[in-house]
Image: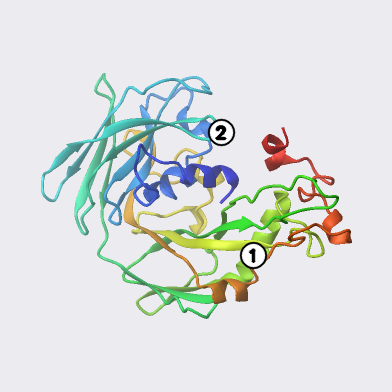
Amino acid sequence: MDGCEYAEANQTLGRAPIGVIASLLVALLLFGGCEEGVDYFKGTDLPYTIWGFMNAGADTQLVRVFPIRDEISFGNTGSIDARVFSTNLTTGEQREWTYRRVEFDNLIEGHVFWSPFRAQHNHRYRLDVVRSDGETSSAEVVVPSKIDFEFDINTSSTIIPVRILGDVPNLIGLRVTYDAVNIPPSSAWPPGTPVAPAVHFPVTISYDKLVRQIDGGWAMEINLARDFAAIRIAYDVNCLITDYEGSAPDVWLDQMSFSALLGDSTWDAPDGEFNPNVLAVPGALSNVENGYGFFGAGLGIVEGWSPTYEVVRNAGFRAEPRCTGFARDVPECYNPPIPCVDERPPGIWAEWLN
């Protein structure tokens, strides 16, 4: 997941917690989150592009809707001429969804519709997006059967086995997010030199290619020690740590979480890979009638926990700052108080430096 996808995945909808909007994580954001180009197709009469899915694991359902325009449009364009309805074709219940305009960190707007209900297993739903002139884009889905997942979180092991049990045709967007923080020195030489503050910088690791099929489901192992190497690289690239000989080489882990979408058989990506660059092409993956995009069904998983101190240490994380107390006239204390600021543009530190 790149920076744009991560930023969008952590947006909130009103006061809704991140767990409630986890259904944005894959279908709605991975496919359409950063690409403005998917909301226009010059010369077409179709009204909308739709991205989202019925999530049996959430108490609130969401869908992102793009109006199809005849010209490229960037920036903020206000509201959208659309109303969204869902019908449970199994029970006959109909709902109108609530509109919310969302501004992402890259200044691209999003038209999101939501409704507070839990999609029921084995029920068929129809989603209708209706324009004021009656033009409608729609999709039908069947929510798959109940699925179980197990985490074997050991208090002393850096390996966490994960089992996903049940009929799961597609696993999409398996991600482990590490909510970590850098450990700056408490002082630097010469005395009085300013020291950069600690920065929480979550890093997300993809596990899409590290899962395997087993009898009755799927299995994978979260490996904290292996992921720690990638986390250090991310912190180094973002100018948050020094090398191991420097004054601030350490990263500490506060919490971590696992997220995934367990999709039904309709999630049939080209060549079996959910590549956002491919999926942004009209019709590459679509079940929308009189429109573009995809509206699926499945179970969104978000599981978070705090590893024990022993596990965090064994994985390579450290929280002991160097140059503690009175700074000493030693080489490690002469390191830039802001890591690597002498080598690369300050980037994340720009605001702090000013």
Name the residue: 57% across, 63% down. Answer: 253
Q: Position of residue 150 (x, y in %)?
A: 37, 73
Q: Could you say which is closer to the camera, residue 179 or residue 287?
A: 179
Tell me the kind of residue under disc 2: Asn
In this rendering, the answer to whether 172 lies above or below 102 is below
Secondary structure under the numbered disc 2 in the rendered image: loop
Q: Could you say which is closer to the camera, residue 267 or residue 230?
A: 230
Quadrant occupied by the C terminus: top right
Name the residue: 20% across, 51% down. Answer: 124
| Distance of label 2 from label 1 (alpha carbons) | 33 Å
In this rendering, the answer to whether 307 lies above or below 40 is below
Name the residue: 51% across, 40% down. Answer: 281
Badge 2 crowding class, 10 Å Cα cut-off, few under 14, some 14 to 19, many 20 or more, is: few
> Residue 319: which numbered mark, if any?
1
Secondary structure under the numbered disc 1 in the rendered image: loop
Q: 88 left or right of 300?
A: left
Q: Position of residue 109 (x, y in %)?
A: 47, 29
Q: 286 left or right of 324?
A: left
Residue highlighted by disc 2? 106
Badge 1 crowding class, 10 Å Cα cut-off, few under 14, some 14 to 19, many 20 or more, is: some
Which color scheme does this rendered protein use? rainbow
Q: Where is residue 286 in the image (x, y as percent from the top left)?
A: 39, 44
Nearer-N-terminus badge (2/1):
2
Q: Could you say which is closer to the camera, residue 339 or residue 56?
A: 339
Tell me the kind of residue under disc 1: Ala
Q: Position of residue 272 (x, y in %)?
A: 49, 58
Q: In which quarter of the image is residue 335?
A: bottom right
In this rendering, the answer to whether 42 lies above or below 342 is above
